[in-house]
């Protein structure tokens, strides 16, 4: 491989185990290096003569991959015939009746789109719907953000939060001098995979303290303090997944000062704006602090949860730059990342979002529906806490009402989780995370019984 090819190859943190995705990349690298050594004749004579007409598949060596730790929970849930089964695995909002929710304002926007006969199905530009990008930047940075007014922000429509993170990773791997990204422990399980395959090398910083079930703020400051200057740091903008533990605004300010003094580059993952407090501006505070100081940062935004657009895959990726000139050039390079990946993003979901965000009345209706979702999640926290207290379940369960956002990080271990799944048909991730948005007043007693039994029998 030439040095250029070599530098284009993703790097891996040696401390990490050699996963199937790592193997996929190694296989790709081997594949790409073959033509320099092999002549066309080699490949003909090397072809196994028995490959055709035999029962053996050319993929016979492919091993069965494990299910995804989060989405696999739904696969197992779907197979369970029990009428009492409960899926608290994936973070997907459910109504009191346990049904998925399409927001009324989303239905209205869709109707408006369908009725508009002038709408066509042409390709969007590589960076997506221009109006969607503008409105998404306003939503996360604030309408009066100086970075927006000074045209220092570039925003591109991406495939929800995951796609935004992936595009960001690949851009950084190509154009940023420090390819190490620090992620919190624990974090969303897909983060290390997205960043590694995006070409970054992943390291971790301390975040959660199991003893206090709170933030390990000292550990966080120490780890970021000893990160190399320029390193990228992944920050959950609010409603940290899976712990539900967020820094206070004072702690955010200290994190900001430390990161800016060391030249660490913030990469925000904003998957839950509005879900933490029920207020869109409040949940964007952490990001806005980093923009207000004039420094640079990256933001991945998702509309999956706050607009309930999960399967529409709507998100935005922004880079706040020091100048409009840099932002323009950065955008031109983002296009080169996106074009060979999926060419351009889908039109429908982004049109829904733009329709809602541009219209004052629809925007207001959205904020009311969003607040109702956030409030229902908070009331589930109180109901579960009360139900455990009523049962006299051993332990301090106050973290259930203290934690923020969609999830409770219960502290249950993987044996207790397995017990609850087997005996009570309750499905959750093996780290003890439960999606509070999947609970209802009807199902709280069942969950409380299961937790009580798990703690008292498997304690
Ligand atoms: N970032 C964080 C912190 C997330 O929790 C999730 C989704 C995403 C990004 C990606 O969301 P998107 O691509 O759908 O916009 N986490 C979920 C779902 C809700 C999942 O794992 O895909 C979860 O259950 O953790």
Image (tube, rainbow, N blue to C red):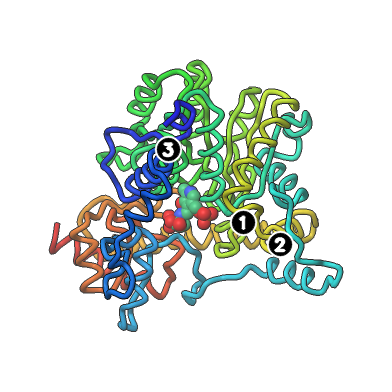
Q: Which residue is mark 3?
A: 36
Q: Is residue 285 above or below residue 387?
A: above
Task: Looking at the image, tell me whether mark 3 or mark 1 is earlier in sequence order.
Answer: 3
Q: Residues within 10 Å of mark 2 (few under 14, many from 20)?
A: many
Residues at circles 2 and 1 in contact by the CB criterion of under 8 Å: yes
In the rendered structure, the answer to whether residue 373 lies left or right of residue 452 reads right
**Residue of label 2:** 352
Residue 46 image point, x, y percent: 32, 54
Work out whether residue 167 or residue 282 is closer to the camera in this orientation and state it: 167
| Element under disc 1 | strand
Pick whichever of labels 2 and 1 is earlier in the sequence: 1
- Asked whether, in this view, residue 168 is left or right of residue 146, the answer is left
Question: Which badge, 3 or 2, is on the more N-terminal residue?
Answer: 3
Toward which corner of the image does residue 288 lie, by quadrant? top right
Residue to which mark 1 is pinned? 314
Image point (39%, 20%), residue name: 225
Which one is in front in this view, the residue at disc 3 or the one at disc 2?
Answer: 3
């Amino acid at each position: 491989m030439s040095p250029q090819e070599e530098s284009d190859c993703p790097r891996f943190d040696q401390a990490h185990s050699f996963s199937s995705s790592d193997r996929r990349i190694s296989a790709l690298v081997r594949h790409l290096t073959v033509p320099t050594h092999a002549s066309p004749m080699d490949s003909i004579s090397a072809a196994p003569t028995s490959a055709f007409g035999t029962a053996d598949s050319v993929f016979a060596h492919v091993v069965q991959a494990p299910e995804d730790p989060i989405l696999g929970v739904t696969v197992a849930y779907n197979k369970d015939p029990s009428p009492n089964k409960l899926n608290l695995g994936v973070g997907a909002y459910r109504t009191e009746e346990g049904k998925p929710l399409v927001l009324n304002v989303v239905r209205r926007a869709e109707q408006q789109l369908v009725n508009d006969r002038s709408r066509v199905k042409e390709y969007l530009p590589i960076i997506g719907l221009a109006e969607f990008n503008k409105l998404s930047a306003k939503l996360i940075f604030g309408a009066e953000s100086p970075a927006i007014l000074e045209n220092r922000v570039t925003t591109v429509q991406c495939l929800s939060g995951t796609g935004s993170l992936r595009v960001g990773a690949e851009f950084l791997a190509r154009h940023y001098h420090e390819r190490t990204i620090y992620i919190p422990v624990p974090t969303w399980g897909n983060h290390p995979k997205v960043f590694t395959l995006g070409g970054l090398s992943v390291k971790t910083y301390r975040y959660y303290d199991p003893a206090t079930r709170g933030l390990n703020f000292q550990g966080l400051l120490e780890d970021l303090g000893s990160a190399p200057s320029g390193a990228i740091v992944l920050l959950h903008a609010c409603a940290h997944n899976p712990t539900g533990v967020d820094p206070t605004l004072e702690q955010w300010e200290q994190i900001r000062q430390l990161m800016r003094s060391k030249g660490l580059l913030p990469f925000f993952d904003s998957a839950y704006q509005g879900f933490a407090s029920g207020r869109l501006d409040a949940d964007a505070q952490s990001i806005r602090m980093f923009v207000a100081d004039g420094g640079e940062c990256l933001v991945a935004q998702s509309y999956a949860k706050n607009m309930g657009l999960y399967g529409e895959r709507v998100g935005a990726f922004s880079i706040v730059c020091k100048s409009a000139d840099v932002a323009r050039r950065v955008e031109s390079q983002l296009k080169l990342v996106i074009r060979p990946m999926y060419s351009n993003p889908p039109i429908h979901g982004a049109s829904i979002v733009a329709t809602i965000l541009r219209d004052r009345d629809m925007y207001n209706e959205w904020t009311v529906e969003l607040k109702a979702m956030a409030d229902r999640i908070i009331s589930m926290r109180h109901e579960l806490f009360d139900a455990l207290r009523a049962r006299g379940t051993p332990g301090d369960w106050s973290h259930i009402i203290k934690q923020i956002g969609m999830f409770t990080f219960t502290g249950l271990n993987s044996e207790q989780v397995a017990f609850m799944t087997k005996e009570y048909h309750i499905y959750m991730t093996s780290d003890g995370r439960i999606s509070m948005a999947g609970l209802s007043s009807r199902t709280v007693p069942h969950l409380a019984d299961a937790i009580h039994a798990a703690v008292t029998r498997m304690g």
